[in-house]
């Protein structure tokens, strides 16, 4: 099983980035959820991954890991912070979104804990793991 992830990790990372990007576009363009400031920052780190990982997957270029990992780790840290300010009461006071949509807004709250920032965090973690597994195989 791990050899599959090692061989095709780049493709899996690209698929996760593609699904995450399409999901964020669905939420904003079809469901009409207006993104807050932190959502935009997460998009800034996710959207380029679709293009970079797509090209690297097509070319089987392992060098992309060096460039994609900082994007996925930084995006993941932003997602984690965003999720924490939504779910941890004393962190809500540190909310960075002062204009427009508040970052503490829960457009979705499935099962009481699954929010959009958590979905983004899971995507960033999966991308990071797939890239690391792929790099180990090279």
Image (cartoon, helix red, strand yellow):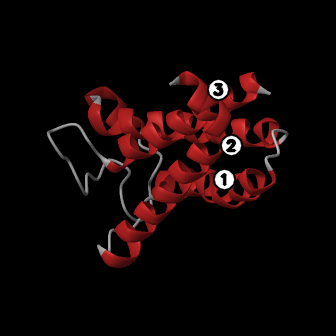
Return the residue nearer the eye: 57 or 25. Answer: 57
**What secondary structure is found at the residue carrying circle 3?**
helix
Q: Residue at x 47, y 55 (%)?
A: 20
Question: Against 86, is 43 above or below?
Answer: below
Please indicate whether residue 11 sits to the left or right of residue 105 in the image.
right
| Residue density around tag 3, few if under 14, some if 14–19, many if 20 or more, within 10 Å | many
Location of the C terminus (image quadrant): top right
Q: Residue at x 25, y 57 (%)?
A: 107
Residue matched to label 1 = 49
Q: Residue at x 36, y 30 (%)?
A: 91
Residue matched to label 3 = 133
User: Mark 3 to mark 1: distance in Å?
Assistant: 17 Å
Q: Residue at x 15, y 38 (%)?
A: 112
**What secondary structure is found at the residue carrying circle 2?**
helix
Identify the image quadrant of residue 72.
top right
Residue 2 x %, y %: 55, 23
Asked whether the beta carbons under mark 2 and mark 3 sit within 8 Å of each other, the answer is: no
Let me know if residue 93 appears in the view.
Answer: no
Return the residue nearer the eye: 72 or 38. Answer: 72
Residue matched to label 2 = 71
**What secondary structure is found at the residue carrying circle 1?**
helix
Residue 15 x %, y %: 54, 52
| Residue density around tag 2, few if under 14, some if 14–19, many if 20 or more, within 10 Å | many
């Amino acid at each position: 099983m791990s050899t599959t992830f090692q061989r095709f990790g780049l493709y899996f990372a690209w698929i996760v980035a593609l699904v995450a990007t399409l999901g964020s576009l669905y939420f904003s363009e079809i469901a009409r959820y207006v993104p807050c400031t932190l959502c935009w920052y997460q998009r800034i780190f996710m959207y380029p991954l679709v293009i970079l990982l797509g090209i690297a997957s097509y070319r089987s270029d392992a060098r992309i890991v060096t460039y994609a990992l900082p994007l996925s780790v930084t995006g993941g840290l932003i997602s984690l912070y965003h999720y924490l300010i939504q779910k941890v009461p004393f962190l809500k006071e540190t909310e960075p979104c002062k204009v427009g949509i508040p970052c503490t807004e829960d457009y979705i709250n499935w099962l009481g804990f699954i929010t959009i920032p958590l979905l983004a965090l899971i995507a960033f973690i999966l991308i990071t793991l797939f890239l690391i597994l792929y790099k180990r195989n090279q």
